[in-house]
């Protein structure tokens, strides 16, 4: 059998010994003999491997092992954080941490709650299990995360010196308003005036995390660009709405929606409006020359694709915003320019996309002047109303041979502008130079360390250059019947707005307000997205373009009503569930009232496991019956992420408390548990294997010979019946009985006859002579004796 290699993804957060043994057994054909050699310390995560050892034994496959012993030095570990699943806001409660030690020792500890130290000290431990007791009185609703850290001298395994516990603090957290300046304006004032709790933060300074968002009734992005967040945070916002039932409101302005870079962002699909440009809104034809860095650094991978691939996709995403009459050119540049697409109207874009997506990274750095000159040559003959260069470069590797200052002066004088998308940070080696290129080119510069954000940055710059995504004229408003969906109101006339972001309502979205101009664009659109609700008010809520709407007498009640709708509904009372963790295994139980049989589900409930990290997939696990009134689902925690839970039964949903795994289960303290050597010894004993101190000795041992025992009862029964039938036939039909003695006699006679025919025919002699010869032969034989007679017989036979 030819070994084709391993295909399992390595999990650096655990040691799935059972999975490894199953994989090893699967690569051995049933008819083959084999041994399995395990090199391990016997510490494992996941299911127990002992049942697999019996499977190996049934196939006569021995499991040998080479044991690697862990250090026997002092080990201090956090065994478990015991917190209540739920507490009320302002309620004092006590909780404890189980700390394990294999030897008496002294140590220091520090307890943090949401990155704030709430307890610290120094104490000593006895060998075995110890308890540290803490108290807290949480004031903020949401998920409280408690992190305990131990510090001990000569600790053998510092990996298990951490503990994480979570509890859900019941209550309603304030509405979070994110602004560019971090200051509350007219919108925050209006919500407070309506009795709402509001918290205002600066968008670029906030760190969006699921544990903070989960208890908030709504999040408001007030005219903030997508570049104030990273893609991870935008994905968290989308999950907050779609998976945990949160509310999201985005208001318009020059830094919002399409002009703010939300096109092609992870949050775009959550919005009830699309952000593309349509040719009916365009007043000027665009000509864009894309200059792409294809230096060696662009060959580095981001996930499964290269940086070059993502830059190519960004270029294609920007072209998707252009009409078939707009012009585009693409040059890939390292130490010299490589024309990919000559400047021409885009047409159906298929040929353009194919060529651009085929660009690969080269070598060396990018010669910036060379790239700008290549873009300038492409645009020289264009008659488009807007001519623009988008330069994509590595902020740490952008060389500048040539007089770029004079070149950009000539370009801007001719009406050609230039912007820069820089992969890197503002502190990188060539960041200041690229900033100067954008400044002299009368364009913008965008820095990003997230290559996945390139498509939205390309799109953002293209939208801004089109000058068609924001209407800065005073516009009247029309209201529609769908407005009643957000709550009762007495609003009849709406004042004008001073400007708005031009968007287009998605097919399933509702439009409550629209503009009374040529575009009839949605001004207030909203929809149910997953479990949550999302709304877009494309006018500016507070600022230069709010117009008369900002001074409207019903401004406060309008936004208060809208936020009430965004908050959604609470958990259904008939769903009651609990979450329990044992090691790295989590069991979620859904219970039903036995006195209300109508509460039993008619559809299969699903458990949704939502990691706090947005780049980890959401699990959907069908629940199974545990009894007449309870259903369960079980899964493994494979990393130290916090996991949130939601149960869905038809159109009903229940949010349950989260759980956390403090550290890799492989480093769980062995105090009171079987040792790793014991585990390996049992595997070998059950499968007929042995410990191997010399690893290659397993290669020279004869594998077990598989013995197969088969029953002979059937063939023997058939043979017996045949013999009986033969005997009966012989007696009744006269075929002759089967007589062993007569058969033996016939054999003797036949043998004698055969011997007689084999002797030579003697010549005729007298009887006296024959007698005389026989007597002489007998006398001679007696003289020879038995041994002599044997030798004589052999001589004659030769």
Image (tube, rainbow, N blue to C red):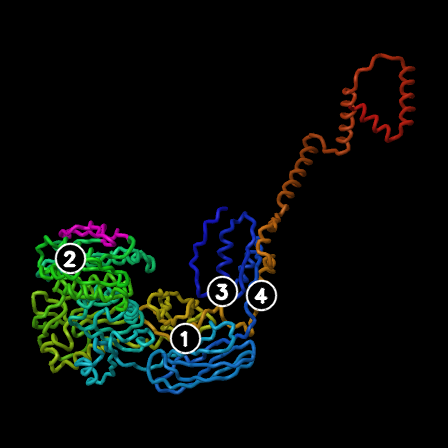
Q: Secondary structure at mark 2?
A: strand
Q: Label 2 belongs to which residue?
A: 288
Mark nearer the N terminus (3 vs 4): 3
Task: Give how far apart the Cα atoms at labels 4 and 2 are.
Answer: 67 Å
Task: Give how far apart the Cα atoms at labels 1 and 2 are.
Answer: 57 Å
Task: Give how far apart the Cα atoms at labels 1 and 4 are.
Answer: 36 Å
Vertical relation: 4 (above or below) 510? above
Mark nearer the N terminus (1 vs 4): 1
The residue shown at (35%, 87%) is 90
Task: Give how far apart the Cα atoms at labels 3 and 4 are.
Answer: 17 Å
- Look at discs 1 and 2 and give the one toward the viewer: 2
Mark nearer the N terminus (3 vs 2): 3
Q: Residue 672, how many percent across, how many down?
A: 56, 74
The answer to which of 696 and 683 lies nearer the viewer is: 696
Q: Secondary structure at mark 3?
A: loop
Disc on res. 47: 3
Q: In screen coordinates, is 405 left or right of 229?
A: left
Q: Secondary structure at mark 1?
A: strand
Q: Label 4 belongs to which residue?
A: 677
Q: Quadrant of residue 277?
A: bottom left
Q: Are marks 1 and 2 in contact (CB under 8 Å)?
A: no
Q: Quadrant of residue 268?
A: bottom left
Task: Give how far apart the Cα atoms at labels 1 and 3 are.
Answer: 23 Å
- Look at discs 3 and 2 and give the one toward the viewer: 2
Q: Residue 258, how many percent across, how many down?
A: 18, 66
Mark nearer the N terminus (1 vs 3): 3
Stretch of the chain drawn in magenta:
332-360
Q: In screen coordinates, is 524 left or right of 305?
A: left
- Look at discs 1 and 3 and give the one toward the viewer: 3
Q: Label 1 belongs to which residue?
A: 578
Q: Secondary structure at mark 4?
A: helix
């Amino acid at each position: 059998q030819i070994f084709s290699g391993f295909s399992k993804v390595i999990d650096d957060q655990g040691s799935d010994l059972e999975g490894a043994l199953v994989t090893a057994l699967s690569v051995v054909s049933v008819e083959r003999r084999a041994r399995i050699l395990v090199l391990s310390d016997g510490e494992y995560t996941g299911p127990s491997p002992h049942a697999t050892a019996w499977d190996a034994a049934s196939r006569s496959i021995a499991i040998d092992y080479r044991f690697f012993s862990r250090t026997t030095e002092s080990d201090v570990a956090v065994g478990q954080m015991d917190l209540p699943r739920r507490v009320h806001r302002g309620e004092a409660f006590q909780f404890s941490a189980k700390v394990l030690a294999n030897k008496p020792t002294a140590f220091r500890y520090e307890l943090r709650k949401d990155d704030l130290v709430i307890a610290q000290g120094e104490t000593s431990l006895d060998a075995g299990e110890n308890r540290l007791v803490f108290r807290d009185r949480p004031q903020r609703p949401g998920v409280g995360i408690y992190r305990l850290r131990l510090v001990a001298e000569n600790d053998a395994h510092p990996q298990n010196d951490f503990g994480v516990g979570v509890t859900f603090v019941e209550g309603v957290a304030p509405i979070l308003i994110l602004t560019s300046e971090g200051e509350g304006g007219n919108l925050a004032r209006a919500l407070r005036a309506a009795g709402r709790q509001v918290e205002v933060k600066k968008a670029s300074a906030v760190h969006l995390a699921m544990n903070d968002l989960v208890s908030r009734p709504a999040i408001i992005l007030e005219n903030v660009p997508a570049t104030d967040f990273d893609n991870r945070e935008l994905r968290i916002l989308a999950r907050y709405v779609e998976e945990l039932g949160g509310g999201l409101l985005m208001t318009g302005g020059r830094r919002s929606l399409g002009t703010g870079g939300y096109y092609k962002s992870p949050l775009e699909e959550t919005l009830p409006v699309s952000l593309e440009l349509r040719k009916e809104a365009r007043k000027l034809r665009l000509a864009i020359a894309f200059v792409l860095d294809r230096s060696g650094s662009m060959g580095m991978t981001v996930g499964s694709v290269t940086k070059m691939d993502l830059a190519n996709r960004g270029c294609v995403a920007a072209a998707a915003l252009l009409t078939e009459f707009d012009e585009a050119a693409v040059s890939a540049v390292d130490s010299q320019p490589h024309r990919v697409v000559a400047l021409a109207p885009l047409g159906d874009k298929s040929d353009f996309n194919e060529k651009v997506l085929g660009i690969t990274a080269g070598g060396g750095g990018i010669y910036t002047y060379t790239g700008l000159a290549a873009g300038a040559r492409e645009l020289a003959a264009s008659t488009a109303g807007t001519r623009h260069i988008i330069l994509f470069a590595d902020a740490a590797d952008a060389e500048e041979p040539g007089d770029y200052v004079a070149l950009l002066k000539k370009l801007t004088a001719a009406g050609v502008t230039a912007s820069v998308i820089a992969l890197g940070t503002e502190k990188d080696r060539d960041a200041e130079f690229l900033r100067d290129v954008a400044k002299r080119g009368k364009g913008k510069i965008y820095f990003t360390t997230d290559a996945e954000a390139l498509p939205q940055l390309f799109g953002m710059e293209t939208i801004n250059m089109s000058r068609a995504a924001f209407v800065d004229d005073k516009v009247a408003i029309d209201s529609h019947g769908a407005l009643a969906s957000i709550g009762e109101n007495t609003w009849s006339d709406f004042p004008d707005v001073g400007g708005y972001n031009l968007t287009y309502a998605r097919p399933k979205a509702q439009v409550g307000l629209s503009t009374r101009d040529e575009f009839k664009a949605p001004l207030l659109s909203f929809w149910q997205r997953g479990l949550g609700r999302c709304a877009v008010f494309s006018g500016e809520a507070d600022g230069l373009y709010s117009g008369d709407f900002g001074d409207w007498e019903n401004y406060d009640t309008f936004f208060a009503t809208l936020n009430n709708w965004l908050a959604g509904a609470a958990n259904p009372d008939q769903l009651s569930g609990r979450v329990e963790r044992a090691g790295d295994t989590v069991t979620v139980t859904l219970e039903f009232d036995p006195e209300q049989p109508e509460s039993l589900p008619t559809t299969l409930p699903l458990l949704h496991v939502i990691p706090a990290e947005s780049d980890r997939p959401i699990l959907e696990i069908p629940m199974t019956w545990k009894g007449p009134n309870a259903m369960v689902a079980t899964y493994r925690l494979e990393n130290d992420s916090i996991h949130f839970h939601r149960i869905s039964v038809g159109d009903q949903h229940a949010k349950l408390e989260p759980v956390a795994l403090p550290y890799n289960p492989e480093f769980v303290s062995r105090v009171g548990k079987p040792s790793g050597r014991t585990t390996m010894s049992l595997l070998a004993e059950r499968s007929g294997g042995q410990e191997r101190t010399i690893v290659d000795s397993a290669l020279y041992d004869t594998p077990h010979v598989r013995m197969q025992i088969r029953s002979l009862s059937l063939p023997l029964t058939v043979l017996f019946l045949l013999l009986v039938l033969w005997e009966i036939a012989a007696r009744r039909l006269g075929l002759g009985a089967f007589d062993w003695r007569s058969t033996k006699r016939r054999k003797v006679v036949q043998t004698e006859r055969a011997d007689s025919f084999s002797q030579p025919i003697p010549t005729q002699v007298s009887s006296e002579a024959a007698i005389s010869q026989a007597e002489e032969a007998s006398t001679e034989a007696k003289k020879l004796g038995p041994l002599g007679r044997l030798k004589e017989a052999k001589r004659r036979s030769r």
